Amino acid sequence: MMHQELLKLEAQGTPIRVGVSGAGWMGSGFVAQVAHVPGMEVTVLADADTRLAWEAFMATGVAREGIVEASAPGPAMDALRAGKRVVTGDYTLAAQLEAVDVVCDVTPSPAIGAETAYACIRHGKDVVMVNIEADVTVGRILHKLAQEAGVLYTVSSGDEPGCLMELYDFVTSLGWEVIVIGKGKNNPLDPTATPETVAEAARRTGKDPFQVASYVDGTKTMFEMACAANATGCRPMQRGMIGPQATLETVSQVFALQEDGGITRFPGAVDFVQGPSMAGGVFVVVRVEDERIRDDLQYLKVGRGKYFTLFRPYHLWFLEAPHSVARAVLYRQPTLVPLEHPVAEVMTVAKRGLQPRERLDDFGGYTFYGIIDGAAEARALNALPVGLAPGAEIVRPVAAGQIITWDDVRLDEESTVVKLRRQQEGCEP
């Protein structure tokens, strides 16, 4: 059992030593959770704003004198040998340290995630991504490079894709036919949402307005379902998915195949549902032909007829990620990795008219949002992957609602995420 293995490490004084990229809301929450996990500790915490890293460590009870700020491997290793924690502004530092067993990227940034993961691969360090945005953007090439280097690359559990992967594996290992995998969306979909329109909701929840707007405009949901799609082979039925209203009582029939009165066009689709009944959870709708098994599932109240829904009513995001860290280190098992060939992409769409020399802002901002489509369809449209959009410079006019293409922007070709995506494009058929 994982818990017993971790207790053993704790008793031996040999905990799993974790380096972390990101000390914002997500990263600091991950650090807070690991402080309660036996046999595991965060020893290095990187953030461009090192003040946040100091605060995250001290919030877990680490004294200020027990923390050292470092920017080079030598001083960092000296601090770790002395039993101190290290904060740094360098996202690649933890990967270079012998006294770190595994590195986690706990940011929503494809650029930071790519930089962190690539550094880990180059330095022979396992990496756990609490960053689905980076995985959707460059996960295939990172996984390939990790395999070649003999290290482990995985997306963590906790966010919907990792939780869905665990449920999908459970269902498919029982031999049931998967019809739809998906999530319950926490808020109504509004692609026009901006930090200004969600400011009050963000204030009430103490969240960044850009972050809240990325949920409401659908970008986050599109990333989540593309990540799950590319790990399972399930595909969106149409651009943007369907996103019907559904409850736990109705979802099985809503997502029945069209031949059986539902909306699903083919087995093996990804989608989401709207409405409070399933918000925050993940689900898999299956079709079962065996009458005996149908009777048993109906008795167990997971559906009726031949469609049944397995539903997990929660996801705990970065709070669950330590499980994936332990699974990676103790058992050499990934939670979620992309398949060799993509089936979905998240394309960039202009929220308003854009002119040359303007720069795209960030997820949930004023200039763009993301929308899922099939990978082949996105490639045919020359659509810019939304993970590359932040900071891109517009080079020709783009109308509101128009898909932004590779030719519409100038990218920072020296950035790690762009280089990796260019390499990934060369790997794809």
Image (spheres, rainbow, N blue to C red):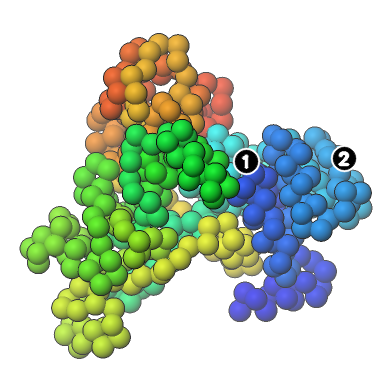
Mark 2 closeness class: few <14, some 14–19, many ≥20 residues within 10 Å? some
Q: From the viewer's side, name the closer residue of 18 and 424.
A: 18
- First along the sequence among labels 1 and 2: 2
- Quarter of the picture containing the C terminus is top left
Taking 32 as reference, is 203 left or right? left
Taking 43 as reference, is 335 left or right? left
Q: Amino acid at mark 2?
A: Pro
Q: Which residue is mark 1?
A: 116
**Residue at horizontal 27 percent and vertical 43 percent from the top:** 240
x, y (%) of residue 94? 73, 44
Residue 320 shows in the view: yes
Q: From the viewer's side, name the closer residue of 296 and 33.
A: 33
Q: Which residue is mark 2?
A: 75
Q: Is residue 343 above or below residue 368?
A: below
**Residue at horizontal 28 percent and vertical 27 percent from the top:** 401
x, y (%) of residue 282? 38, 63
Q: Amino acid at mark 1?
A: Thr
Taking 102 as reference, is 245 left or right? left
